[in-house]
Image (cartoon, helix red, strand yellow):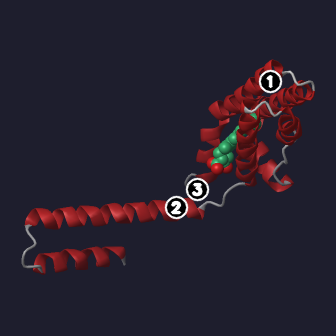
C-alpha cells in the first residue's frame, strides 16, 4: 500500500510540467524519509512501555525536585522526598519475574544498585533532618552515582531486550 502511494507520487511528479529531475528525486527522498519515520514510530508504539519506565520517570522527577531543594537549602523538602526515592515502588510481580528471568546471574548486581540507591537516600534523609547541607550533597551524589551505575550496566541491554525486535 505504501509502495502504491510512493509510485503514484512519483508518477504525479513526473507528470508535473515544471518538475525537473532533481526536484523529483528530492521529493522521492523526502517521501522515503517520511515513510522511515512512520515505520519507526509504529515500531516504538508496538512495544508496550514497561512499568519500570514509569517508576524511573518518577525517580527522575523526584531527583530533580531534590536538586531544586538543595539549591535553596530547603532541607525539609529533601527529608520528605528522600524516602520516596529510596523506597520507590516496584514493578508488578509479573514484570519482575520477566526482568529476573532475563537478567539471570546478574540479578545480584542489578539489585545491588537499587540497594545502594536505598542506602544513599536514607543517608540523605538523615543529613537533611540534621540540616547538614554538606552531608546531604555527599549522599545525593551517592544516590546519583547508583542511578548511573545501573544505567551504565543495564539500561541499554534492557531496552534492546524488552523493546527491540522480537
Ligand atoms: C537497578 C537498576 C536501576 C537503578 C538503580 C536506576 N535505574 Fe533508572 N532505569 C533503569 C532501566 C532498566 C531503565 C530503562 C527502563 C525502560 O526504558 O523501560 C531506566 C530508565 C530511567 C529513566 C528514563 C525513563 C524513560 O522515560 O525512558 C530515568 C529518568 C531514570 N531511569 C532515572 C533514574 C534515577 C533518577 C535513578 C536513581 C535515583 C535510577 N533511574 C536508578 C534501571 C535503573
Q: Secondary structure at mark 2?
A: helix
Residue in the foreground of this view, choosing between 96 and 115: 115
Using residue 4 as the reference point, say whether residue 47 is left or right of it: right
Residue 112 percent across, percent down from the top left:
81, 29
Of badges 1 and 2, the one in the foreground is 1
Of badges 3 and 1, the one in the foreground is 1
Q: Alpha-carbon neighbours of circle 1 within 10 Å: few (<14), some, or many (≥20)?
A: many
How far is the residue under mark 1 from the one under mark 2? 40 Å
Looking at marks 2 and 3 on the same chain, the residue that comes earlier in the sequence is marked by 2
Answer yes or no: do the residues labelled 1 and 2 have beta carbons within 8 Å?
A: no
Q: Secondary structure at mark 3?
A: loop
What residue is pinned by disc 3? 166
Q: Residue 110 is drawn in which quadrant?
A: top right
Looking at marks 1 and 2 on the same chain, the residue that comes earlier in the sequence is marked by 2
The image quadrant where one finds ligand 1 is top right
> If the image is split into quadrants, where does the N terminus sit?
bottom left
What residue is pinned by disc 1? 139
Residue 43 percent across, percent down from the top left:
52, 61
Residue in the foreground of this view, choosing between 166 and 146: 146
User: Which mark, residue 69?
Assistant: none
Q: Residue furthest front?
A: 72
Instruction: Determine the residue positioned at 77% across, 20% down.
Output: 138
How far is the residue under mark 2 from the one under mark 3? 11 Å
How far is the residue under mark 3 from the one under mark 1? 40 Å
Task: Count up the numbered dots.
Answer: 3
User: Which mark, residue 43?
Assistant: 2
Of badges 2 and 3, the one in the foreground is 2
Instruction: Determine the residue positioned at 81% across, 48% down.
Output: 96
Amino acid at each position: 500500500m505504501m509502495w502504491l502511494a510512493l509510485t503514484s507520487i512519483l508518477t504525479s511528479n513526473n507528470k508535473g510540467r515544471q518538475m525537473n529531475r532533481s526536484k523529483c528525486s528530492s521529493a522521492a527522498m523526502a517521501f522515503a524519509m517520511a515513510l522511515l519515520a512512520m515505520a519507526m514510530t509504529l515500531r516504538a508504539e508496538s512495544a508496550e512501555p514497561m512499568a519500570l519506565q514509569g517508576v524511573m520517570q518518577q525517580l527522575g522527577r523526584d531527583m530533580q525536585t531534590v536538586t531544586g531543594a538543595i539549591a535553596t537549602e530547603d532541607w525539609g523538602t529533601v527529608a520528605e522526598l528522600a524516602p520516596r526515592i529510596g523506597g520507590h515502588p516496584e514493578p508488578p510481580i509479573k514484570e519482575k519475574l520477566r526482568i529476573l528471568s532475563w537478567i539471570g546471574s546478574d540479578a545480584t548486581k542489578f539489585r545491588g544498585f537499587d540497594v545502594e540507591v536505598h542506602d544513599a537516600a536514607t543517608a540523605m534523609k538523615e543529613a537533611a533532618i540534621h540540616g547538614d547541607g554538606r552531608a546531604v550533597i555527599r549522599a545525593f551524589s551517592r544516590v546519583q552515582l547508583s542511578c548511573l551505575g545501573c544505567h551504565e550496566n543495564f539500561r541499554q541491554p534492557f531496552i534492546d531486550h524488552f523493546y527491540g525486535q522480537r
